[in-house]
Amino acid sequence: MDKSVKIEVKHLNFYYGNFRALEDISLDCYANEVLSLIGPSGCGKSTFLRCLNRMNDLISISRVEGNILLGGLDIYDPSVDVVMLRSRIGMVFQKPNPFPKTIFENVAYGLRVNGIKDKGIIENRVEESLKLAAIWDEVKDRMHESALGLSGGQQQRLCIARALAVEPEILLMDEPCSALDPIATQKIEELIHQLKKSLTIIIVTHNMQQAARVSDITAFFYIGKLIELGKTDTIFTRPNLKQTQDYITGRFG
Amino acid sequence: MSVSKSSLQRRKNLLQKIVFNVFRFAAFINGLALFIIIYFMIAKGWKAITWTFLTQPPVDSMTKGGILPCIVGTLCLSIGAILIAMPIGVASAIYLNEYARPGPLIRMIRLGINNLAGIPSIVFGLFGLAFFVVWLKMGVSIIAGALTLGAMTLPVVIGSTEEALRAVPDTYREASLGLGATKWQTIYRIVLPTALPGILTGTILGISRAAGETAPIMFTAAVFFTPSLPLSIFDEVMALPYHIYVLATAGTEIEATRHLQYGTSLVLIFLVLGMNLIAIIYRSRLRKRMQ
């Protein structure tokens, strides 16, 4: 099967002031695959993830070198509208962060800010997204209650639905299960399997088993460098480098 | 060994008790101060509070009659000050907290705001007289007084708004931007609604403080005596704090009008408490809607 490259990262360097947080990262990410980023805390995997939707732009002292191509488009090109870009790339955060609004309004938010006003369209898309995120049955009778009344796991799936509503091509997940219990985690992982049929997912995780379970490709980061990149099966069974082996077997990290 | 240990334990427990009671006393003083003030006002002023007092203008050189023009005047000045201070203050705070990148300019603006907060109210009064009343030819009027009170309240509004904005978790901002919202959409649809209860509380507290000020309005808005109610924002008014000041220092019958002074004070206190109460009720309703 032909695989199409979704994201192409070429010689990416990222600086916080004078500190180089990412060193010469190059990798390709293919459509409808799940790429997991693993590595010890502070290795730059979250920073890398945030380069992909330019969330790092918010940090005034940050600087980016190199290229990130999204379907051939250089996302750091001055002509790129970062607001447009972010509506093509969804993001799910470490801690569930629903807005202090109703469940319905949370999911409708992305549509509203992107100029969709038609009530029917919004209602349909909200329902679709909640179904995709496997939370529809749990919330369909309480759509107009506050999202803050949901459990942590439900909140995170709501956040996924919120991201899906804008129909992104890529979903970035920054340790989406680190604040959740094992059952909620399992639901999110099943969801990732479902979602990759329609989009590309890049997930940061501290949980080796999770990376092994959900991803096709795994990238191991260590102190700002991409140490090893390969098929998840290979990385977890016969990694090329001893450093990778040490990390995934828990000898450091 | 065991004896010395238990005496140490006793000393520790004793110290613990002393410190605890000192703190408790300090906290208690707050309530006591408020209680004493309100007790005095009620004890000395309640006889003055009648229907006539609340609904009639003063008569007989302000030794009889009511204080309706003062109540109306103070309400007008307070509402005017809110209308002026809130938009400017909230907009400034949004700029400082959400848009501005730290630098010398921002440091200077902040320094300015902090110093504005430290300026004595009588200086605001003189500034209002020179700038609004004379230079801008507004005359002694509600608008000049409201602008002066508004300027005086600005630092409070900015301070509490900034605090409320900072209390909005950054993850809300990131989530909104991540969905393709612009910065302004994020502020308008997420940050401001979340911060609104805090903004309102701070603003109302600032205004109710200003409502009781005499110095800023004595040259800009308030007059000694006018029996008529204001018809436009360019009319001069009577005001509660200034009326108290006048009765207590410059009236024809200072001793004979003591009960009127306390009665007026009582009305002022309840007006301010009323404004605070509205703010608190509104805030808790907003909070409930968000939970």
Image: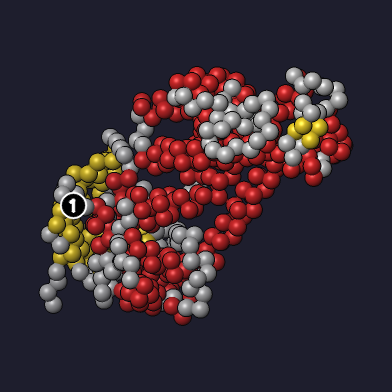
Tell me if residue B81 can be seen. yes
Q: In this rendering, would B242 be left or right of A121?
A: right
Q: Position of residue B244 (x, y in %)?
A: 74, 28
Q: Position of residue B166 (x, y in %)?
A: 48, 43
Tell me if residue A44 can be seen. no
Q: How many marks?
A: 1
User: Which residue is at the front of the view, B244 or A26?
Assistant: B244
Q: Quadrant of residue B236?
A: top right
Q: In this rendering, would A166 be left or right of B239?
A: left
Near mark 1 (Cα within 10 A), the count class, few <14, some 14-19 or many ≥20, is few
Which residue occupies 50% across, 49% down? B195
Q: How is the image coloured?
A: secondary structure
Q: In this rendering, would B267 be left or right of B204?
A: right
Amino acid type at mark 1: Val
- Kindly give the residue lying farthest to the bottom in the view shown: A137
| Rendered view: B241 above or below B278 | above
Q: Position of residue B253 (x, y in %)?
A: 82, 22
Q: Dot 1 corresponds to which residue?
A: A80
| Rendered view: A225 above or below A194 | above
| Rendered view: B110 above or below A24 | above
Which residue occupies 55% across, 30% down? B141
Which residue occupies 18% across, 52% down? A80
Placement of the N terminus of chain B among the 4 image quadrants: top right
Q: Quadrant of residue A176?
A: bottom left
Q: Find numbered disc 1 in the image and state the secondary structure of the residue it sits on.
A: loop
Which residue occupies 68% across, 27% down? B225
Question: Label 1 marks which chain's residue?
Answer: A
Placement of the C terminus of chain B among the 4 image quadrants: bottom right
Q: Position of residue B128 (x, y in %)?
A: 52, 23
